[in-house]
Image (cartoon, grey):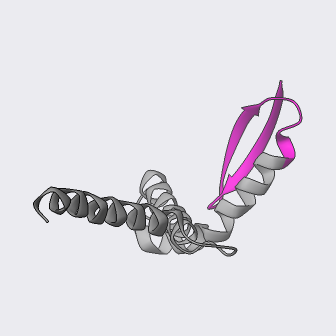
Amino acid sequence: MGQITLTVAGRSHSIACRDGEELHLERLGALLDRHAETAVRASGGLSGERTMLFLALILADLLDEAERNPPGGVSPVLLDNLADRLEAVATALEDRAPNA
């Protein structure tokens, strides 16, 4: 079993992982640390827990944006909305057909 230490927002965290996952976790830690300064400012530096909450919100916002606007295609959210609307239209047309 592997073990690494990630430093995020100036705090060190020891993380156990499967052998071979160390590099991946280091990249994830670097991603967290890139946004850490913004999270610290947003939290007012009041607590590590609050900073991590803001960091999670920042990353969730980035993930949401990526899901809504994927770089290489149509958003799954948009496709779901279109499918729902098409189903509603189909249902409305089916309901009208016997009365026509």
- Give x and y (percent) for residue 25: 76, 47
Q: Nearer the viewer, residue 87 or 32?
A: 87
Q: Is residue 93 magenta?
A: no
Q: Residue at x 83, y 39 (%)?
A: 21
Identify the residue at the far left of this view. Answer: 99
In which quadrant of the rendered view does residue 16 lie?
top right
Identify the image quadrant of the C terminus. bottom left
- Give x and y (percent) for residue 34: 68, 69
In the rendered image, the vertical position of residue 25 relative to residue 45, given as above or below: above
- Give x and y (percent) for residue 6: 73, 49
Q: Residue at x 89, y 36 (%)?
A: 20
Q: Nearer the viewer, residue 76 or 50?
A: 76
Q: Count all numbered tags in the image, as a single digit.
A: 0
Instruction: Classify residue 74 as left or right of residue 90.
Output: right
What secondary structure is the magenta-colored segment mainly? strand
In which quadrant of the rendered view does residue 97 lie?
bottom left
In the rendered image, the vertical position of residue 10 relative to residue 40, given as above or below: above
Q: Is residue 21 magenta?
A: yes
Identify the residue at the far top of this view. Answer: 1
Instruction: Classify residue 85 as left or right of residue 17.
Output: left
Q: Nearer the viewer, residue 8 or 31?
A: 31
Q: Which residues are magenta?
A: 1-23
Identify the residue at the far right of this view. Answer: 20
